Amino acid sequence: MKKIILFVMISVFVLPLQAQSKATNTSPRIIILATGGTIAGSGESATKAAYTAGKVPIDDLLNAVPQIHAYGKISGEQIAQIGSQDMNIVTWLKLSKRINEIFKNNEADAIVVTHGTDTQEETAYFLDLTVVSDKPVVLVGAMRPSTAMSQDGNRNLLDAVMVAASPKSQGKGVIVAMDEKIYDARDVTKTSTTNLETFQSRNFGPIGLIYDGKVNYYYQSVRNPSKKFDITKLSSLPQVEIVYGYADASPNPVYCMINSGPKGIVYAGMGNGNFGEPVGKALAEAAKKGILVCRSGRAGSGRITLENEVKDAELGFVVADDLNPQKARVLLMLSLTETSDRTKIQENFFEY
Ligand code: ASP
């Protein structure tokens, strides 16, 4: 009996303290910026699916994983406390500005952002295009709320901290660490509504793996231009909408959009960004009115190529290359803060 009590006391009090005390003067300073999501989700039952995202505050998240302190000097900040379905441009700007400020003031050597999985890919790409630093920025989330049996958030958070602390993560652009894999922000996408292994990079695969406390990289994207978009003076972004393509689609959504005055429309087309005639006519009218029309695809992988079945130059369209519609929107919004020149914006889609 005494042995059991001693064992419990060592496990509960001594092991976490040991983990916490491992950071030394040379350990990296890592700030964890929390935005909410399922990783901070809380439900009434450990086995039922219902829960509310973004309930658990950052301090509780950190206290639940004392092992993170072995990898650096960790501190946390609450940026937002929302399900990422409510992520918005104001919060993107706040997050990006704070990260740039942290690195400029040398407050940290690396940053981890906890985030819901629904829109994590968009936030990651937005940060990738706007954060000016070679230091690691790692996004992480979870598919099961913190109160669930076999929840994935604690392990994912520990892995994300390991990735952020690793010198190998320098100069990789913004990355996503989930489910023992590391993904490039530009390529990663959520592919399953409920599966734990939801994130994938369908065109190119993960760039690295995390296993047994080790971080290993295998590939690196060359689409990481040193010139980032300057958001320091921005409090909003140009309005860009997405319209979905399908068989026998009516052009009505495009006309409604035109009337709402957007600066850009991303078309999530069939196959290689294709459309039926009525939608094509409506999109061409949008382009004539000066709205930047970008063809992307609903297929989930592959590229949209210029002048294939669509006369892009004649109709005034650009193509998204291999960006999915939601990421094409991010790049188009940022591009439109600098220019409305179609040729220049097309160059951005081939460069960023
Ligand atoms: N709806 C949640 C969110 O994106 C889902 C998750 O985090 O997995 O915040």
Image: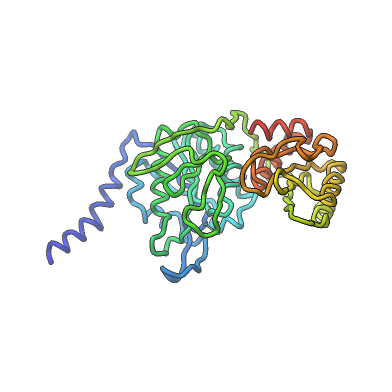
Residue closer to the observer: 136 or 150: 150
Q: Measured from the top left, where is residue 96 in percent x and y?
A: 58, 42
Spot occupied by residue 14 in the image (x, y as percentages of width and height): 23, 53
- Residue drawn at x 42%, y 56% is 152
Q: Residue at x 73, y 44 (%)?
A: 273
Q: Which image quarter holds the N terminus?
A: bottom left
Q: Residue 73 appears in which quarter of the rendering? A: top left
Furthest residue toward left: 2
Q: Residue at x 52, y 65 (%)?
A: 52
Q: Residue 127: x percent and y percent?
A: 58, 41
Against 239, residue 320 (above or below) is above
Q: Is residue 227 above or below residue 147?
A: above
Nearest to the observer: residue 325 or residue 127? 325
Residue 51 on image: x %, y %: 50, 66
Quarter of the figure with the C terminus: top right
Question: Above or below — where is 106 with respect to 197?
Answer: above
Chosen colour scheme: rainbow
Q: Is residue 219 left or right of residue 328?
A: left
Residue furthest top as drawn? 226
Q: Quadrant of ligand 1?
A: bottom right
